[in-house]
Amino acid sequence: MNEQPNIIRVSVSEAARLFGVDPHTIRRALRNQEFRYVVVQGRYKINFESLIQWSQNRITVKNKLDKKGIGQFVDRWKIKNKKFSPNPQILDSNEKNENNT
């Protein structure tokens, strides 16, 4: 049985908020066909995977992602599994603090 992959799609405004850019930047990329999308009831729904790839190929967008977009919260996320942790040293210091209390 072939299972369809679960495709995540976001609106223009959601994409702009997530990546910390102006909605005009997203619309310009849509006009230039820089990522995959579908139109649902007259609204653009952008393929999230292609949006990520687009953002990583543009330095200014990547920087805005880290400063104004969702990237600004990554350091605050506490990931318990060190295999997927962005910074294992933070986890080590947190574990020591928890064990001392």
Image: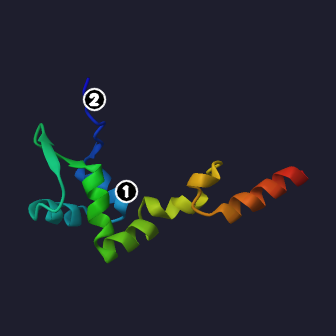
Instruction: Name the residue type under label 2.
Output: Glu
Instruction: Tell me where residue 79 appears, x and y as whole percent.
Output: 61, 51
Tell which of 95 and 5 is nearer to you. Answer: 5
| Dot 1 alpha-carbon crowd within 10 angstroms: few under 14, some 14 to 19, many 20 or more | some
The mark lying in front, picked from 1 and 2, is 2
Q: Quadrant of residue 77?
A: bottom right
Residue under the image location 16 percent in, 62 percent down: 34
Q: Is residue 18 rendered to the left or right of residue 83?
A: left
Q: Are marks 1 and 2 in contact (CB under 8 Å)?
A: no
Residue 3 is tagged as 2
Measured from the top left, where is residue 28 in percent x and y?
A: 15, 65
Using the image as rendered, state which of residue 23 and residue 44 is in the foreground: 44
Whether residue 77 is visible to the viewer of this picture, yes or no, is no
Callout 2 secondary element: loop
Identity of the residue drawn at 27% across and 29% down: 3
Q: x%, y% of residue 64? A: 38, 70
From the viewer's perspective, is residue 89 above or below residue 1? below
- Estimate the spatial distance between the alpha carbons at disc 1 and disc 2, rounded to whole Å: 28 Å
**Is disc 2 surrounded by few (<14), some (14 to 19) or many (20+) residues within 10 Å?**
few
Residue 45 figure quarter = top left
Q: Residue at coordinates 23% horizontally, 53% vertically from top-left?
A: 12
Residue 100 found in image quarter: bottom right
Q: Is residue 78 left or right of residue 34?
A: right
Give the amino acid type for the residue marked by disc 1 in the picture.
Answer: Leu
Q: Which mark is residue 18?
A: 1
- Scheme of colours in the image: rainbow
Locate the N terminus by quadrant. top left
Q: Position of residue 41 (x, y in %)?
A: 12, 37
